[in-house]
Image (cartoon, grey):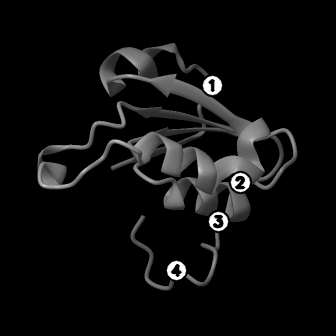
Amino acid sequence: MNLPNPGRSPRTTVRGQSYALEIGVFEGRSTVWLLENILTHPSSTLTYVDTFAGGAEHESQDLTDLESRFRANTEPHRAKLVARKGRSGRASRREKGTQLISLK
């Protein structure tokens, strides 16, 4: 997520119960940010889609524990997360009513 000042929340926030879709979560840093700064309503949820295999830019990295790192980083928000492990084209078609989409 590229924000001019990542220490501040954007002026526009989502009010009330919200549903977000994040495609490509890597280690979950932006997932945590979204949950702590945008999706703050107790009933808000974030559905994430990822293969946890990385992309071409990660070919030289060992990603064998990538999914476990994501789960550890997002553990405090586990109740608000919906997992869709797989490629984005298939998994994201099931998400209706999404109000916010984050693509990487």
Which amino acid type corresponds to the residue marked 4 in the rendered image? Answer: Pro
4 or 1: mark nearer the eye: 4
Q: Nearer the viewer, residue 71 or 42?
A: 71
Q: Residue 26 vs residue 40: left or right?
A: left
Residue 60 at x, y percent in the picture: 12, 54
- Element assignment for label 3: loop
3 or 4: mark nearer the eye: 4
Residue 47 at x, y percent in the picture: 58, 33
Determine whether label 4 and label 1 are within 8 Å by CB: no
Residue picked out by circle 4: 6
Cα separation between marks 1 and 2? 14 Å
Q: In this view, does 100 lie above or below 33?
A: above
Cα separation between marks 3 and 4? 14 Å
- Specify the quadrant of the image occupied by residue 79: top right
Q: Nearer the viewer, residue 93 or 80?
A: 80
Residue picked out by circle 1: 97
Residue picked out by circle 3: 12
Determine whether label 3 and label 1 are within 8 Å by CB: no
Residue picked out by circle 2: 14
- Specify the quadrant of the image occupied by residue 38: bottom right
- Element assignment for label 2: loop
- Element assignment for label 4: loop
First in sequence, mark 3 or 1: give its number: 3
Which amino acid type corresponds to the residue marked 3 in the rendered image? Answer: Thr
Cα separation between marks 3 and 1? 19 Å
First in sequence, mark 1 or 2: give its number: 2
Cα separation between marks 4 and 2? 17 Å
First in sequence, mark 3 or 4: give its number: 4
4 or 2: mark nearer the eye: 4
